[in-house]
Amino acid sequence: TPSLTHTIGGLAGSIKNATISGVSVTGTIDGTFRKNTTLGGLVGYTNEANSSIDRTYTDVDITVSRSVGGANPYIHIGGLFGIDVASTTPLTISNSYAHGDILVNNSNGATSLGGLGGSGLGTSLSNAYSSGSLTLVDATMDSQRIGGLIGAIGGDNLEISNVFSVSQITAPD
């Protein structure tokens, strides 16, 4: 589990054992951070969440810059959630979508950027989609992961069905 410095969400910074249903979040999140950051349009961080998100949408534009600082620096950022670390009890997302433009300038660190989530380790997705633009600029480290739905995904409890992304992705070579 990463040592978190900033956990930011349009609804909550972090959740555990939560049910979020019928919620909408709109707005803008802008920030410059010196240390590690997990950020989502809805929720920033879930750990062994045993949580569900259903009939929820976000329309949030996010602009994040990271300056020098911290050891093993990273940013996990997504339209719904920043990172889900759920090796035994997955975060379940259903009938939900994320729209918005996300711009990440991470000149000194690793990035996981996705239309729905930055990193999903055991996330269950059904009937979900993402739209908007995902842009990564000035990424100087090798560890840059960008996906229309999830930037980095894995884990034993992974289940994905009836999902799609129409996100436009722009990243450096």
Image (cartoon, rainbow, N blue to C red):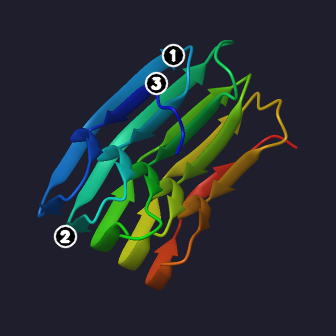
Q: Residue furthest right?
A: 173
Q: Amino acid at mark 1?
A: Thr
What SS does tag 2 mark?
A: loop
| Disc 2 target residue | 55
Quick check: can you spot residue 115? Answer: no
Q: CA distance from mark 3 to mark 2?
A: 30 Å
Name the residue type under label 2. Answer: Arg
* Tag 2 near tag 1, CB within 8 Å: no
Q: Secondary structure at mark 3?
A: loop
Q: Nearer the viewer, mark 3 or mark 2?
A: 3
* Element type at mark 1: strand
State the residue at coordinates (58%, 35%). Answer: 75
* Location of residue 62 (image quadrant): top left
| Badge 2 density bin: few <14, some 14–19, many ≥20, Cα 10 Å | some
Q: Residues within 10 Å of mark 1 (few under 14, many from 20)?
A: some
Above or below, 33 relative to 54: above
| Mark 3 residue type | Thr
Q: Where is residue 42 drawn, in percent x and y?
A: 29, 47
Dot 3 surroundings within 10 Å: few (below 14), some, or many (20 or more)? few
The residue where tag 1 is placed is: 32
In terms of sequence position, does the residue under pointer 2 or pointer 1 come before the other?
Answer: 1
Q: Are marks 1 and 3 in contact (CB under 8 Å)?
A: no
| Residue that appears at 42% across and 26% down | 6
**Is residue 49 in view?**
yes
Which sits earlier in the primary sequence, circle 3 or circle 2? 3
- Identify the residue under disc 3: 5
Q: 40 or 3, which lies in front?
A: 3
